[in-house]
Image: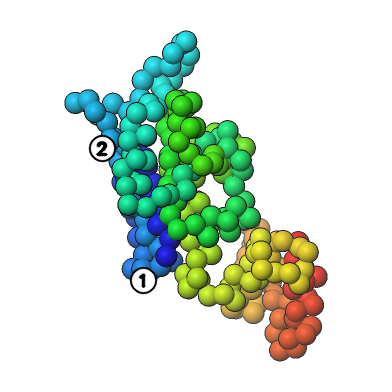
Amino acid sequence: MITFDIVTIFPKIFKEYFNTSILGRARENGLIEIKVHDLRDFTEDKHNTVDDRPFGGGPGMVLKVGPIFKALKTIEKKEESHKVLLTPKGKQFNQKKANKLSKKKRITLIAGRYEAFDARVNQFVNEKISIGPYVLTGGELPAMIIVDAVCRLIPNVIEKESLKEETYSLNNKESKKKIEYPQYTRPEVFKYKDAKGNMHEMKVPKILLSGNHKKIKEWKEKNAH
């Protein structure tokens, strides 16, 4: 089992997503544990202040180091955790990193908001991760993305066969191509009218209906791109 601790100032954001579908079932079956911590619970003033103006001037507000340090210290009272700061300045997240994180027993994800973190927070984390070369309003979506990607690699969360052939699978050594082949399902022929009223048909490739597993495999490898 793997445990995720998420530090955020918007804990309610996560409830619906983590209780739904595959992640919800994985939690119910005791395969993963997800704990969401409100950063305001670790403040020491009556206003539960988590941010302040930056020294030296500049726009926006900066998340304070004190509450984050206290949150990390509280989380690690019973067990050491791999601490991740979610920031655009971090190394870009990919499937290889998801696989490495899936080997951890406990991971703490720190979701930022506002302008930035106090730079001293960097001293208390193991690594910094970004989910892409763009800026979001906060680290909550990156936290959900990382949890989702990592949890899929935990044994019994998803069937092994499904993981072998999917996009960016690390287990698919039969092909150098990383992107999955096209998928089709019923009906075999899809009929539709375009904006001008003309009828069209879209058919499933015949090879997928042939039952010839060797030919189907060759088709899949050829069409993966």
Quadrant of image for the N terminus: bottom left
Front one among 2 and 161: 2
Q: How is the image coloured?
A: rainbow
Q: What residue is drawn where x is 70% and y is 75%?
A: 203
Q: Which residue is mark 1?
A: 29
Quadrant of image for the C terminus: bottom right
Residue 65 image position (x, y, % from top left)? 39, 28
Instruction: Inspect the image, locate mark 1, and give the three-letter code of the amino acid beneath it.
Output: Asn
Q: Is residue 44 above or below residue 108?
A: above
Residue 152 image position (x, y, % from top left)? 51, 64
Residue 191 image position (x, y, % from top left)? 63, 72
Q: Secondary structure at mark 2?
A: helix
Which comes before the other along the chain, label 2 or label 1? 1
Residue 206 image position (x, y, % from top left)? 74, 81
Q: Residues within 10 Å of mark 1 (few under 14, many from 20)?
A: few
Q: Is residue 186 visible?
A: yes
Residue found at the far left of this picture: 46
Q: What residue is drawn where x is 79% and y is 83%?
A: 215
Q: Is residue 191 visible?
A: no
Q: Secondary structure at mark 1?
A: loop
Q: Residues within 10 Å of mark 2 (few under 14, many from 20)?
A: some
Residue 187, picture quadrant? bottom right
Residue 25, picture quadrant? bottom left
Q: Is residue 19 above or below residue 69?
A: below
Q: Which residue is mark 2?
A: 41
Q: What residue is drawn where x is 59% and y is 70%?
A: 163
Instruction: Inspect the image, locate mark 2, and give the three-letter code of the amino acid beneath it.
Output: Asp
Q: What residue is drawn where x is 36% and y is 47%?
A: 76
Q: Is residue 137 left or right of residue 90?
A: left
